[in-house]
Image: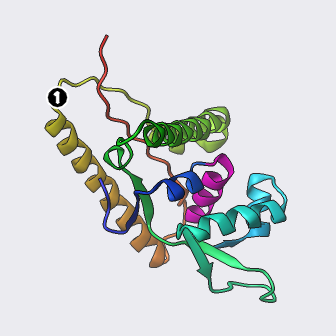
Amino acid sequence: MTHKGDRRVADMGTLKAIAHPLRMQLYRALHVAGAATASQLGEQVDEAPSLVSYHLRKLAEHGLIEEAEPRSGDGRERWWQPASEGLSVHDEDFRSAPETSAAHTAFARLLVDQRADLYRRYLDERQAWGAEWTGASSDSESTLRLTPDELAELNEELLTVIRKHDEKGREREAAGGTEGRENVAVHLYGFPFRV
């Protein structure tokens, strides 16, 4: 499923550019920040600005990020921003050959690992968030009996709800409602399995 503001990654060069652990971290950090410099991102990911700059240029070569207007400073440092609202990678674009299928699987595994790391970090820091946030957080699993069409329909409905809440939150924040607002990760997986 592709959201209208998403960039569909459908070629091996772009997939390989984003399927790198540090580049994926940088891409995520840019989405959270909206725009940032290599120095700012280097502090977040604990890497040297020169290394971060190299990886940012690789992401830019494939149109995943772009230069942004300077937000502050003396203008000597480049600012970067995502080139789209998000990315979508579809299995059908990469199943034509074993090497493209393997690259897609490696990318998907990287995403799962990074998402799991983010959730583990939340679990480790949970007490510091307080009862209001821990009470609002969720962790659930459901096992359904569905057809492929029903699973696709379920995924589209869930994404529609998530997009609605994202837009409402952004509108409220733009109107000045910043009190108590934090970044929130919502991870959904819907996939078949056999016991």
The amino acid pointed to by label 1 is: Leu
Q: Is residue 29 magenta?
A: yes
Name the residue rendered at 36%, 69% in the picture.
5
- The answer to whether 147 appears left or right of 131 in the picture is left
Residue pictured at 48% horizontal, 39% vertical: 99
Badge 1 element: loop
In the picture, measured across the screen, residue 90 lies left or right of residue 14, that is: left
Q: How dense is the environment of label 1, judged by Cα within 10 Å: few (below 14), some, or many (20 and up)?
A: few
Q: Looking at this view, is 150 or 183 the one in front?
A: 150
Task: Give the residue number, with chain letter if any, for mark 1.
Answer: 146
Residue 54 position by quadrant: bottom right
Q: Is residue 191 above or below residue 77?
A: above
Q: Residue at x 59, y 59 (%)?
A: 27
Residue found 29% across the figure and 26% down from its top: 192
Q: Position of residue 162 (x, y in %)?
A: 34, 54
Image coords of residue 40 (percent x, y)? 76, 67
Residue 82 in picture, x, y percent from top left: 54, 69
Which color mode does the image show? rainbow
Q: Decide whether residue 146 is among the magenta residues.
A: no
Q: Is residue 6 above or below residue 75?
A: above
Type of secondary structure dominating the magenta stretch: helix
Front one among 105 and 3: 105
Q: Is residue 33 visible?
A: no
The image shows residue 155 at horizontal and vertical percentages of: 26, 44
The magenta region covers: 20-32
